[in-house]
Image: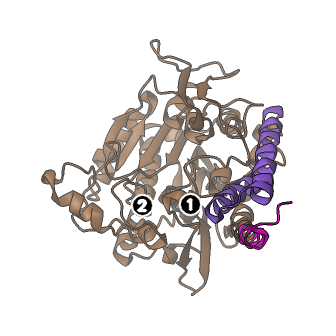
Amino acid sequence: MSLITIVYLAIAAIVFLSVLYNLVMKEERVVDKIACAMILVPLALRLLMIK
Amino acid sequence: MKKKGLVSTCIILAVAIFMAVFTGISFSKKRNFVEDVVTAGSAVTKTVKLSTYNPNLAGSFGDVDIYVLEGAEPGGQVLILGGTHANEPAGHMAAIVMLEQFVPTKGTVYVIPDICKSGLSHNDPLEGTPQYLHFTTAGGETRTFHFGSRASNPIDQWPDPDTYLHTSGEWQPLNLPANAKTTQTLSGSEVRNQNRCYPGIANGTLTEKVSYAVTNMINTLKIDMVIDLHESSPEYAVNNAIVAHENAKEIASMAYSLNLEEQGMKFKIEPSPISLRGLTHRELGDYTDAFALLCEVGNPSQGRFRGFTDETLAITGKDPCYKVASEIHDGKLLYVDYSSGDFPISLRVARHVAAVAALVEEMGFEYPEKEILIDNIPDVEEMIETDDLGLWLR
């Protein structure tokens, strides 16, 4: 795995954690929570290097 | 933690986790699915790993098998590449049919049906493309093959650069035209396009490593001809065509006029553009002494005019939107004859088989020392009439 891939994975991990924090701690409207969840799915698949 | 909306948060998170697991299993299965290429009973005399020609590939996802079909008598050598673009299934399937059916009696046939295995390991869900194709053999067995993506899997090389700068790496040209460029810039995602990465770089990206191995294999084994099998959307001008490097244009022209036209098969003979870098028909002609050729056939499941996209469309090529497109503007929207309303994979594979047989035969006619004789070439007319590709698989 190249250095740039590791950097990008780190960025993806930070975005994933930020969105998860927003979903759990901040968002109050259901539609906003759903939007957060939809962002998390592809980020999780990329972090696990599945897709 | 805030208290308001905790229940809805938990439900939404649970649904997201379920979606991630469900899709993750599907993508993971696709990534790891191994096609059952049948060599038992075929003329395959041995298999060699592609990493033999680039050790940097060893153990990687691009280290595919080279199927070697050796005739009893020495003669010429041809390399057949399938699966360069994994969303062009006739190229992949034609290579599999050839390695399972061809029986060379003179010379050697090398077949790599999954040259971009990384591309076969994923598909383009947003294009609605299927993950697999299924065919039933004459014995009633269902065989499953990949339907992939045009480009290598980002899992294998990511991120893409903003701009892909193509270079020829350490290679020194053997037959480069005087006015040709040797570098080129393309959209960043093209860095994962197998057919923009030739002649390849030994320690580059996975896609470049694979291309390097192919170029090195041709030079090491002194292979006489390389044929890359593709498909293209019906509205693309280079269609139902043989694209030939300058060194192979006579063979392509004569193979068409003396053989394919006689069989009633229309092909256009296209010259390989000298400034379009990275493609097999360009680089493998410039950086090796092989006759470099690429075959294209129309594939409605690729085009932008297509309607509902699924496995049936990829196999039958039957699409009402293309039928309409063929009937308006005097049929000038398309570069294939779509008047029948379909373009089945049996026909598309048959065209590839016919083209390969004609090109190999013509090389032997023009260069007797490079003659390759092949028995058990599938009857192209029968293949088209039966319209069932499974009958031509072992």
Chain ID, mark 2: B
Who is closer to the viewer here, B379 or B158?
Answer: B158
The local secondary structure at tag 2 comes to loop
Residue displayed at 27% across by 49% down: B335
Residue B13 part of the magenta segment: yes
Farthest bottom residue in view: B140
Q: Which part of the image, by quadrant, shows the C terminus of chain B?
A: bottom right
The image shows residue B103 at horizontal and vertical percentages of: 58, 63
Chain B tint as drawn? brown
- Cα distance, mark 2 to mark 1? 14 Å
Q: Quadrant of residue B32?
A: bottom right
Q: Which part of the image, by quadrant, shows the N terminus of chain B?
A: bottom right
Give, as a three-letter code, the residue at label 1.
Answer: Pro
- Which stretch appears magenta? B1-17
The image shows residue B265 at horizontal and vertical percentages of: 29, 56
The local secondary structure at tag 1 comes to helix
Q: Nearer the viewer, mark 2 or mark 1?
A: 1
Residue that badge 1 annotates: B125
Residue that badge 2 annotates: B301
**Dot 1 crowding, Cα within 10 Å, few <14, some 14–19, many 20+:** few
Chain A tint as drawn? purple
On the same chain: label 2 and label 1?
yes
Residue B71 visible to an observer of this rendering:
no
Who is closer to the viewer here, A38 or B281?
Answer: A38
Give, as a three-letter code, the residue at label 2.
Answer: Ser
Lateral position of residue B251 relative to residue B371, left or right: left
Who is closer to the viewer here, A39 or A4?
Answer: A39
